[in-house]
Image: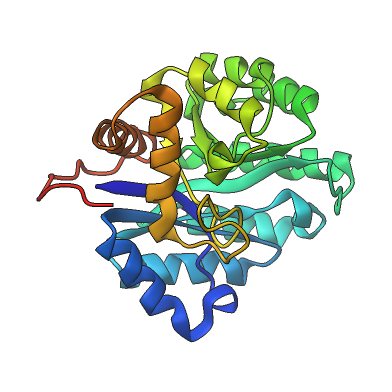
Amino acid sequence: MFIDTHCHLELHRYGDELPFVLQRARDNGVARMVAIGSGGTLATCEEAVRLAEAHPDIHAVIGFHPHEASAFDFDAAQGVAEFAEHPRVVAVGETGLDYHYAFSPPVVQEDAFRQQIEIARMVGKPLVIHNRESDEDCIRILQDSPAGSVGGVIHCFTSGWDLAKVALDLGFYIGFTGIVSFRNGEDVRDVLRRVPQDRIVIETDSPFLAPVPHRGRRNEPAWVVDVARAVADTLGLSLEEVARITTENACRLYRLPDIEPSGSLTA
């Protein structure tokens, strides 16, 4: 059993093929998928919630991505706060900072990030944090905000150990994607080797970052098994051990009911 802790499943990404994408994941042992409703409109949040309402094995995360932080106005904040109360919503995000593209000014990104941290605190749910080329500011915000009181995950981790250590000290999990399978992913694998095993979760970040051997194709949740295999190879563990460890971790992170194992793993 596997859990894809971070995938973008909006219809504009998969269209009429979405039912087949979901079925391929289930057929490949993916017991749960966490749909990220994070964009620049409340419609994206609502789509993730409706998907989670329609499928018992899908849960939702809602928020405004740092790319669209400029759209996070009063109405957006109110809408996210309301959606965050929904029982099928397990976290707030993805929110955070992205200085690589800087589609929104850094000061605007920080304001939206801090507001969503406060929403997570109010509803008592964890955070899903995006961080790219903004480690210093991300560390500062994590340390001087209530983020540690709710915890969460630094998703698609590509940063250095300094951020990982701060996040771990605050009770966060670290999310690893197909980058751990890339030939140029050694820096990420180095961090993976240092993270305590009870803080590791796996994700696809579909439809992005398809793992080896699917690089260059549109990613999908079924391939979280290939992420798990790369984690297993890096840590010297079996695929079964990684499946168990990361599933237990994901259930703690998102406060999901435990999954009863059924049958043997095949991948």
Looking at the image, residue 90 sits to the left or right of residue 94; the answer is: left
Q: Viewer-proximal residue, 76 or 143?
A: 143
Q: Viewer-proximal residue, 70 or 19?
A: 19
Q: Position of residue 255 (x, y in %)?
A: 32, 39
Q: Position of residue 39 (x, y in %)?
A: 66, 61
201 above or below 56?
above
Within the image, what quadrant is residue 188 found in? top right
Q: Residue furthest bottom?
A: 16
Can residue 124 be seen here? no
Scheme of image coloration: rainbow
Q: Position of residue 69 (x, y in %)?
A: 77, 52
Can residue 246 be seen here? yes
Looking at the image, residue 59 sits to the left or right of residue 158; the answer is: left
Looking at the image, residue 165 sits to the left or right of residue 52; the answer is: right
Q: Residue at x 58, y 48 (%)?
A: 93
Q: How many marks?
A: 0
Q: Viewer-proximal residue, 113 or 226?
A: 226
Q: Residue furthest left?
A: 263
200 above or below 109?
above
Looking at the image, residue 29 sits to the left or right of residue 178; the answer is: left
Q: Position of residue 192 (x, y in %)?
A: 52, 24
Q: Residue at x 65, y 26 (%)?
A: 187
Q: Residue at x 26, y 64 (%)?
A: 27
